[in-house]
Amino acid sequence: MRRYGKHTDEDDIRARPNPKGNRPRTSKRPKHEDAAEGFVLTVDRGRLTCLVEDRTVLAMKARELGRKAAVVGDRVWLVGDLSGRKDTLARIVRIEERKSVLRRTADDDDPYERVVVANADQLAIVTALADPEPRPRMIDRCLVAAYDAGLEPLLVLTKSDLTSPDKILEVYASFGLAYVVTNREELAAGEAAERVRERLAGRITAFVGHSGVGKTTLVNSLVGADRQRATGHVNAVTGRGRHTTTSALALPLPSGDGWVIDTPGVRSFGLHHVDPSRVILAFPDLVPGTEDCPRACSHDEQDCALDAWVEQGHADPARLDSLRRLLRTRERREGD
């Protein structure tokens, strides 16, 4: 074996070859100028189904994206085999900047954010009027998340054949919410779907709601028989539905003018990620009244200037009550 002394010439020293190849590593990344644009339809265990032109392509995230993940609703760029044939796999190399992100946390004290969908325009909050019983706090939480994400909320009330919607509508009348009321007979006949579709045209709408409220049944009626998802039933003992939808899925409307995104049923909608100061932006009629508020006013305290503003007749008192109910949900845990 040859031994080297203290004064060796570098030409005498043998360099070990790169075990992964002979090319040196570089920070430069390919530009992928030939990448094709796609739309993420669903994500399942690291595999993403994307719509590329008129075909679905199975893809995985490229290593160069690091920890950045694509979610349903993302606009992405793909390279590789884009034929969509069985047992082929493309790579997602770029993710377009998102125009909106709907997030939630498991609970109000959970700092881990979960991205529900990206690039949606509207949030359809589906609530049954009975079986299971409506939960207004859940509606409030979804409203806060929608306002924070810049989405327009749509309240969809199902099963009106079991009880009247008047009580719920009275609670949310001051919000100026768009709403649709449906019953099971109309849903079976397709009449309910037509009324809901009018609110979805030209938009990407995410549907959220508790399990068992009829969310997936409604989505099935909206998208047509060839794109049906499995549905479940409400447990007679607990009054809760069973999770049959386990992953978010984007589906096109039959007219081609809009998308619906069916999301898994949730039992909580944490708001740890929401800055309470942003909730006031959902009430533009109250914003001028905050000019005289103390610094860092929460708008739910004794010195808040909104009380005097409303008493002077500048806004409906019910609007202030609505704002404060939303602010208080930020401090509560679901089910309290």
Image (cartoon, rainbow, N blue to C red):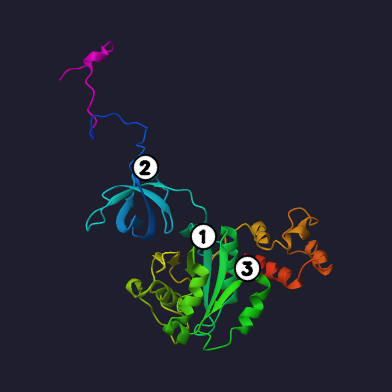
Residue 89 sits inside the magenta stretch:
no
In x, y percent, where is residue 64? 36, 42
- Residue that mark 3 sits on: 329
Q: Upstream in the sequence, badge 1 or badge 3? A: 1
Q: Amino acid at mark 2?
A: Glu
Q: Is residue 8 a member of the stretch shown in magenta?
A: yes
| Mark 1 crowdedness (10 Å alpha carbons): few <14, some 14-19, many ≥20 | many
Residue occupied by mark 1: 102
Residue 59 placement (x, y as % from top left): 31, 53
Residue at 50% x, 82% y: name it. Answer: 132
Earlier-in-chain disc, 1 versus 2? 2
The type of residue carrying mark 1 is: Leu
Residue named by callout 2: 64
Tell me where the magenta segment starts and ends, as one range.
Answer: 1-18
Residue 256 appears in which quarter of the rendering?
bottom left
Q: Quadrant of the N terminus?
A: top left
**Percent x, y of residue 50:** 35, 57
Q: Nearer the viewer, residue 208 or 73?
A: 73
The residue under the point 22% across, 28% down is: 17
Q: For the residues marked 1 and 2, what is the alpha-carbon distance in whole angstroms?
A: 25 Å
User: What is the magenta segment's predominant secondary structure?
Assistant: loop
Q: Secondary structure at mark 2?
A: helix
In this image, 312 relative to 244: left or right? Answer: right
Image quadrant in which you'd find residue 65 = top left
Q: CA distance from mark 3 to mark 2?
A: 40 Å
Side of 126 relative to 230 (left or right): right
Within 10 Å of disc 3 (Cα), the crowding (few <14, some 14-19, many 20+) is many
Q: For the point 60% across and 62% down, which residue is it?
A: 147
Q: Quadrant of the C terminus?
A: bottom right
Most extreme residue toward the left is 1
Q: Name, please, the residue furthest toward the bottom.
A: 162
